[in-house]
């Protein structure tokens, strides 16, 4: 049992660093745009470089990752992730940072699927849900502690500091993988009895229900990640926040979702996923349109709006994930969820690029046209409700 707890701690730490590494780019936006003297469009490329790379490599990894010992695969992939993060910390300029983000994303895109595979292989069924919950809690930890702390040390030092910090933690986690993770090869032989990823891709393409499930995920990302990367730059340039005050947005938003997420999950089980998704999809429109149209506003009012956005926008993901997972036959669910993860990453990247083409900056440094991004995101939110209502549960 002690070894199992150590293994889960390592897996949760891997997820924590992976999530913080991705999320930290968005609140660093004001500092990076100022220091690199880049446009909103160029900043969107910085955000999307990671997710484009993660989505593509994560999809391709589904075709070969099961051929290797889980321990060796995790050591290699996480070493690549740590080196990519260190390269981000040492990047001297814009193009070097983009290159480093592509490398980091390539390895980060494989980590999530690997971590879940290790849990499935190493943890008995009667304790697996608890293990999943422990590792998934790393997302909340990243939101409440990781991102605010990274943003704080960036504000008192430089944008390099969060990546140096993550790389240092990553070295310790590598030691944990080396000492606490056993050799895991049992899946290699059993993989021969499973359908190939190519067969599963064809089955997904041939199912209208699964295509709708992937379309739902795409629209959710387009309805949130067009706005999210530019919240921090907009708050500093237009609303009157200092770069250090941005910490409060992520601290309060992450803190309250720790409590609201289980509540939304219970609501979805009690009243149905489609009903709850519809309610939270419509609720998202209010803070979404407020955030993208804010003038200079007192910080307390802004935090109330942004925290509400974190709660209701993130809340949509809970019933939607249940709908998506229930749309596929259990025998194909693992592979399909890997493909769904790749669609999520790629849609996140596309959303950031779309926003980057819409948002511009005037001579005074203020961001323009953010309200149009809000309208586009709101449209995606509304359309996603109609898509969700047409997904058919099969299990």
Image (cartoon, rainbow, N blue to C red):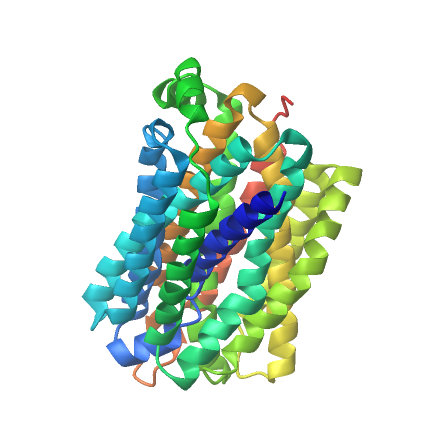
Is residue 346 visible to the viewer in this orientation of the structure? no
**Residue 163 appears at what percent x and percent y?**
36, 68
Task: Give the residue displayed 46% in from the left and 39% down from the top.
Answer: 182
Would you say 8 lies left or right of 368 here? right
Would you say 295 lies left or right of 102 here? right
Closer-to-camera residue (118/380): 118
Task: Give the residue displayed 22% in from the left and 58% down from the top.
Answer: 99
**Residue 142 appears at what percent x and percent y?**
53, 62
Closer-to-camera residue (262/357): 262
User: Height in image: 236 above or below 227?
Assistant: below
Would you say 394 lies left or right of 43 here? right
For residue 186, what is the image quadrant? top left
Task: Give the residue displayed 35% in from the left and 80% down from the top.
Answer: 158
Closer-to-camera residue (231/141): 141
**Residue 86 appears at what percent x and percent y?**
29, 64
- The quarter of the rendered structure image containing the N terminus is top right
- The quarter of the rendered structure image containing the C terminus is top right
User: Height in image: 194 above or below 321?
Assistant: above
For residue 170, what is the image quadrant? bottom left
Q: Quick one: which residue is furthest to the right in this view?
A: 270
Is residue 172 visible to the viewer in this orientation of the structure? yes
Would you say 293 lies left or right of 283 here? left
Task: Give the residue displayed 25% in from the left and 63% down from the top.
Answer: 87
Closer-to-camera residue (304/190): 190
């Amino acid at each position: 049992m002690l070894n199992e707890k150590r293994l889960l701690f390592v897996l949760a730490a891997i997820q924590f660093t992976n999530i913080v590494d991705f999320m930290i780019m968005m609140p660093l936006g004001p500092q990076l745009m100022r220091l690199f003297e880049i446009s909103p469009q160029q900043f969107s490329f910085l955000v999307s470089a990671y997710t484009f790379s993660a989505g593509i490599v994560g999809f391709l990894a589904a075709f070969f990752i099961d051929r290797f010992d889980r321990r060796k695969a995790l050591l290699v992939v996480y070493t690549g992730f740590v080196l990519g993060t260190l390269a981000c910390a040492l990047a001297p300029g814009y193009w070097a940072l983009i290159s480093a983000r592509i490398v980091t994303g390539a390895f980060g895109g494989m980590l999530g699927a690997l971590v879940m595979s290790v849990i499935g292989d190493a943890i008995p069924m009667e304790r697996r849900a608890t293990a999943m919950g422990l590792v998934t809690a790393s997302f909340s930890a990243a939101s409440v502690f990781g991102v605010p702390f990274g943003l704080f040390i960036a504000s008192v030092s430089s944008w390099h500091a969060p990546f140096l910090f993550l790389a240092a933690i990553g070295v310790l986690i590598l030691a944990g993988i080396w000492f606490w993770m056993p050799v895991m090869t049992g899946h290699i032989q059993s993989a021969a009895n499973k359908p190939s990823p190519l067969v599963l891709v064809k089955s997904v393409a041939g199912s209208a229900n699964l295509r709708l499930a992937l379309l739902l995920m795409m629209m959710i990302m387009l309805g949130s990640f067009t706005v999210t990367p530019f919240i921090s730059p907009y708050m500093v340039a237009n609303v009157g926040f200092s770069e250090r005050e941005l910490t409060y947005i992520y601290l309060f938003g992450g803190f309250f979702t720790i409590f609201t997420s289980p509540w939304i999950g219970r609501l979805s089980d009690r009243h149905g996923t489609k009903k709850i998704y519809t309610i939270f999809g419509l609720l998202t429109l209010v803070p979404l349109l407020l955030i993208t149209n804010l003038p200079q506003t007192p910080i307390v009012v802004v935090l109330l709006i942004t925290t509400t956005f974190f709660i209701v926008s993130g809340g949509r993901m809970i019933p939607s994930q249940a709908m998506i997972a229930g749309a596929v036959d259990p025998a194909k669910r693992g592979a399909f969820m890997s493909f769904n993860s790749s669609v999520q990453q790629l849609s996140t990247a596309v959303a950031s690029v779309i926003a980057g083409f819409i948002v511009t900056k005037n001579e005074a440094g203020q961001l323009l046209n953010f309200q149009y991004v809000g309208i586009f995101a709101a449209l995606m939110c509304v359309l996603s409700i109609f898509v969700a209502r047409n997904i058919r549960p099969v299990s």
